[in-house]
Image: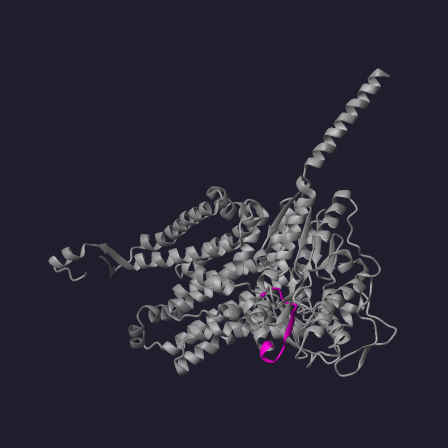
Amino acid sequence: MISLTPRKEIPLTLTLMTPLVAIALTLVVGAAIFGILGYDPLAALYQFFIAPVSRPYQVADLFVKACPLIIIASGLVFAYRANVWNIGAEGQLILGAMAAGFVALTWPNLPGPVMMPAMIIAGMLGGLAWGMIPALLKTRFNTNEILVSLMLTYVAVLFIDWTVRGPWRDPMSFGFPLTPMYADAALISRVELPGIGRLGQLHWGVAGALIFALAAWFMLSRSILGFQVKVMGDAPRAGRFAGFSPAMVTIMVMGISGGAAGLAGMVEVSANIGQLQPDISFGYGFTAIIVAFLARLNPLAVIIAGLVVALAELGGDSAQIALAMPKVVTGVFKGILLFMLLAGETFNRYHVTFSLPHRARMQGDSDA
Amino acid sequence: MKHLLKGIAVGLAALAVSTGAAMAEPLKVGFLYLGTPGDHGWTYAHELARQKVEAHFGDKVETTFVENVPEGPDAARVTRELANTGHDIIFGTSFGFMDPMLKVSKDFPEVKFEHITGYKRSANMATGNIRFYEGRYVQGIVAGMMTKTNKIGYIAPFPIPEAYQGLNAFAIGMREANPDAEIMVIWANTWEDPVKEADAAKVLVAQGADVMAQHTDTPAMLQIAEKAGLHGFGQASDMKKFAPNAQLFSSVNDWSHYYIEKIQQVMDGTWSTGEGPDHWAGNTWKGMADDYLVLSAFENMPADVKAAAEKAAAKIEGGYNIFTGPIKDNKGNVVVKAGEALNDGTLWSDIFFYAEGIQGEMPG
């Protein structure tokens, strides 16, 4: 008989160990799967985790890939800490990209110092507005934010699809669903250091992502808002006694996580694509959920978790090129990682005891 | 004199060895796939062509493919990765790879880039395409003769020039064979989505279509037709095994001729982007006459329909321009005047109309 008893205190070492053990187990299971599929497990792991960062420009690629994940996950941490389950970051990202795109396409002649801040604000507001829909429906009508935010993602996908095929389509694109290219002032430039030159594809949005994660960490650990979020998540009753409004907290965290996703959309399009097209995100909003949990809902750890997950994504391509391994293996890998993390979370929160049922009865063990 | 001869001999030997070494070094060819070869359609056709490239060149080439490449920044990264790992020529097999490849091509002037179905070129990026619409003209003739309800279903992907070329060529062929037949179009807004494609097919069947054509990539529509005892045409690859009784024929894309030709040019040092004063002339765009587009066996049709299909195919291989005026749109306006015809350039810009026989209004 296996029984789970909640731990009263979770030791810090356990908290830190869980993601590491989960990653280690993912590697072991991954290696076994590679072996079964007929690949040399060590060569496959090498292609997945080492080859993608064996050259300097590839390290830059890693940060570029992690950039939207870090921004989105830093925002999602607020929601998940408060037990508000925003699953719709993907849609919020799209709306943010569209709002920023609206600025870039409507006023292409804005000077750089006006254009960039305007696009950043528009991007955040776009994502925030999309996040407000499930937030208000939850606080007003007690709807389920998981369903509403998820379903709104599909609405967002259709919305951008319609705009780039219809009203925003570039008249010079032969009917292909693309907006005109953004003006130079609306593009986030590549990092170029004096004496060194460009660092691969590294762009200034990556620096922004790191600052954003730091700011999120500061807000969560040092501000009253962060305190409210944590109290409402851990002990909602205590929070209400303290006079915190659950509705207000829900609206705040949906706003923050939506705004972050919108910012990620703006950065991704301005730095890497340069125009709106039907597909702009490729699931960053969903992958960021794994990142947030891998980081154990800590914005500083989000930076590392974002890089780890981005590495697995790059590794999937590298394994394809070097070993002709199918791309779906990357998805399997992500799935195993999330599974291991959630399993680890259980062992983290609960004390597990094994006992024989009759002995338990004989001793009158109430845990059985 | 003796020394001189000896020197020449040694020199020749060294030259032979060095060319031998150069020959032994295989040309590395990279492919970006939008989907997986398991789609049995678009990407599968590219995969078959890649295998033909390997069979044709043997040890002289080494090919790599990357599947499921999203049409955005990842396409740029994967392209760059292929360029960085020593690939000499890289084929991007989807329209959405255009701008990402264009960007990367500028960073790797020594690598050759080949973009399929697009229109932008650079100093080292060429474009290539197949005249898919030629097969659809033959489909239209067969559909017009086969239909009993005079209602033809057509599943279209996105409202882009390629789709209008196909749809209008189909309508022109259909009306030549049967002036009473009408086409019901559903824009699926996808290239590859078996669920959406099947739903569209079910709607068309419910509205009375007894022959269906598709410009989307999976066999889903044909499977519906097979179940309902109706007929349809396969797309990109031969889909006979999914609908042995329903498939009239498939328009099969054979990219191998294009790939082999372009790879050979790189080996010979004669590769070029074809860019010149006339943009569209530089686009490698071939069809049935050059076996870029191949029609699979004409099946499940009476002998007279088969004879008409063969006649139409021969006419196109002989160089017939399907878009020769007069062509009217479905409101009766003349869109191509008698004595005029759409050419390789105007087929991309002046093709946005519904030819006679297509029901409804254009999207957008």
Residue B246 picture location, percent across and down: 61, 67
Return the residue found at the far right. B339
- Quadrant showing the N terminus of chain B: top right
Quarter holding residue A114? bottom right
Q: Is B117 rendered above or below residue B157? A: above
Residue B18 picture location, percent across and down: 73, 31
Residue B166 picture location, percent across and down: 72, 69
Give, as a single range, the part of the protein colored magenta.
Answer: B205-219
Q: Is A38 rendered above or below residue A79? A: above
Residue B296 picture location, percent across and down: 68, 60
Residue B213 relative to residue B333: left or right: left
Q: Is residue A94 magenta?
A: no
- Quadrant showing the C terminus of chain B: bottom right
Return the residue found at the far top. B2
* Residue B193 or residue A3, whichever sits in front: B193
* Residue B290 or residue B259, whichever sits in front: B290
